[in-house]
């Protein structure tokens, strides 16, 4: 087979500057909770505005080709914007739409200035910084502060433990929360850091010291957070990696046995989900997934009132907007998400929005699978050798999608930005070009 794709030169910003910008963007995206806890909402807002202004400037200077933009993703965003017309909370939708578009522009800016290897470098650096800093934060609290720490914008006097930034439990054997102020969020960030660092190490694109620190800190954070939901995500990522490696050993047309085994494993996982009660008990979790089933039920009861187009896009719920003021309250804490990204999308945008979102997911999964399995075959013919970095889109998407079953971070901040980046890169960048070539 002869490739007809020309080896066009990419016009990028200087490599160092592009990587620096991407690193800062990831630091802010993954540091939303950190900035809010440590500087308040104004500090977080200032950081976001600065990054958005820089992102807009970069996109204007390096506009992407319209034909390379993923149509389904654009349609989903357009439908979210249009939902303000029928929103049950127009002010909340206006804010949510602006935040989603800001996050999307930031993700687009990363992809127009940096090729995939530079994006991976920036992502790995940002994730390792967050994990290491979170561990150091808990050590400082345990050794010097010696009492729970409250976010700067809250008064935690007499409030539940979930309100605290750090509960000072590192040396008591409790689950640490890190700079994110949430054990489950620190755990998923640690898992992503582990995956990205391992792939970079396999690609020999980071130093031995960075590899050791990244892997050790990530594993330690996973142990200290003890997140059952993230443990499930880790298993899913591991199974997908094994499937990819097994598939790559066989030529197309001889992969039926591998897919048969994969189908058997999926069926087993489905049975495990149906019989989750005893399994969760082994992990020390309640059969109702720590109250999530109650939240799902409450969201569903409201969602069926507007099942086709939803209540209106808002992304992360706002505590000052009805019906979110007490929709998901548990033990004195009001949670601001449906704890399921797909249920959240359906609630906000109805079946139309969920279908668009689902089709976007199908597209990026198929492209990421091709990157991980078959891209290397065509890459040989265009003198673009396969690398371990080709595995990363599929592993990232797997982690995000499985995590989305119990958390809604997939549609806000770092979850949405990472998802959009993978969608954009795999749609437009099959052989490592930066995408703004002319």
Image (cartoon, rainbow, N blue to C red):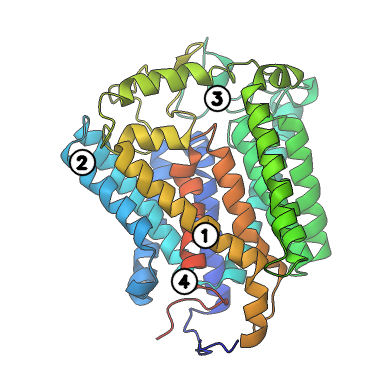
Which badge, 3 or 4, comes first in the chain's sequence?
3
Which badge, 3 or 1, comes first in the chain's sequence?
3
Q: Residues within 10 Å of mark 3 (few under 14, many from 20)?
A: some
Q: CA distance from mark 4 to mark 2?
A: 30 Å
Which badge, 3 or 2, comes first in the chain's sequence?
2
Return the mark for residue 422: 1
Q: Is 434 on the left or on the right of 346, as rendered?
A: right
Q: CA distance from mark 3 to mark 2?
A: 35 Å
Residue shown at 55% from the left, 87% from the top: 3
Which badge, 2 or 1, comes first in the chain's sequence?
2
Secondary structure of residue under mark 1: helix
Identify residue for label 2.
Answer: 84
- Residue 37: percent from left, percent from top: 51, 34
Secondary structure of residue under mark 3: loop
Q: Is 69 on the left or on the right of 312, as rendered?
A: right
Q: Can residue 121 be spotted in the picture? A: no
Q: Residues within 10 Å of mark 2 (few under 14, many from 20)?
A: many
Q: CA distance from mark 4 to mark 1?
A: 10 Å
- Residue 52: percent from left, percent from top: 37, 57
Return the mark for residue 150: 3
Furthest residue to the left?
85
């Amino acid at each position: 087979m002869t490739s007809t794709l020309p080896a066009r030169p990419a016009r990028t910003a200087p490599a160092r500057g592009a990587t620096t910008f991407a690193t800062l963007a990831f630091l802010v995206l993954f540091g939303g909770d950190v900035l809010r806890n440590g500087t308040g909402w104004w500090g977080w807002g200032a950081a976001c505005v600065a990054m958005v202004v820089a992102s807009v400037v970069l996109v204007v200077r390096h506009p992407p080709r319209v034909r390379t933009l993923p149509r389904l993703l654009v349609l989903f965003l357009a439908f979210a914007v249009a939902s303000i017309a029928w929103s049950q909370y127009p002010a909340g939708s206006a804010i949510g739409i602006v935040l989603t578009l800001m996050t999307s522009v930031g993700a687009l800016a990363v992809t127009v200035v940096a090729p995939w290897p530079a994006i991976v470098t920036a992502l790995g650096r940002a994730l390792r910084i967050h994990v290491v800093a979170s561990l150091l934060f808990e050590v400082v609290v345990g050794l010097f502060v010696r009492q729970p720490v409250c976010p700067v914008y809250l008064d935690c006097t007499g409030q539940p433990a979930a309100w605290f930034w750090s509960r000072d439990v590192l040396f008591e054997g409790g689950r640490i929360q890190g700079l994110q102020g949430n054990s489950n969020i620190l755990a998923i960030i640690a898992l992503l850091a582990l995956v990205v660092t391992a792939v970079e190490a396999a690609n020999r694109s980071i130093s031995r010291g960075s590899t050791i620190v990244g892997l050790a800190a990530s594993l330690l954070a996973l142990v200290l957070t003890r997140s059952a939901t993230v443990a499930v995500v880790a298993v899913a990522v591991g199974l997908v990696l094994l499937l990819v490696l097994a598939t790559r050993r066989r030529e197309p047309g001889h992969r039926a046995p591998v897919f048969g085994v994969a189908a058997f494993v999926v069926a087993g996982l489905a049975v495990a989900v149906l019989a989750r009660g005893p399994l969760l008990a082994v992990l020390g979790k309640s059969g109702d997934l720590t109250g999530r089933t109650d939240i799902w039920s409450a969201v569903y009861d409201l969602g069926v009132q507007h099942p086709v187009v939803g209540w209106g896009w808002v992304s992360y719920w706002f505590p000052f907007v009805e019906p979110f003021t007490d929709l998901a309250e548990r033990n004195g804490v009001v949670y601001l998400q449906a704890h399921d990204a797909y249920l959240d999308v359906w609630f906000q945008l109805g079946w139309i929005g969920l279908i668009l979102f689902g089709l976007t997911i199908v597209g990026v999964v198929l492209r990421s699978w091709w990157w991980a399995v078959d891209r290397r075959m065509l890459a040989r013919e265009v003198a673009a050798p396969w690398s371990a970095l080709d595995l990363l889109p599929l592993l990232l998407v797997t982690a995000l999608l499985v995590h989305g079953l119990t958390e809604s971070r997939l549609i806000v901040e770092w979850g949405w930005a990472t998802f959009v980046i993978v969608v954009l890169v795999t749609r437009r960048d099959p052989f490592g070009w930066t995408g703004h070539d002319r």
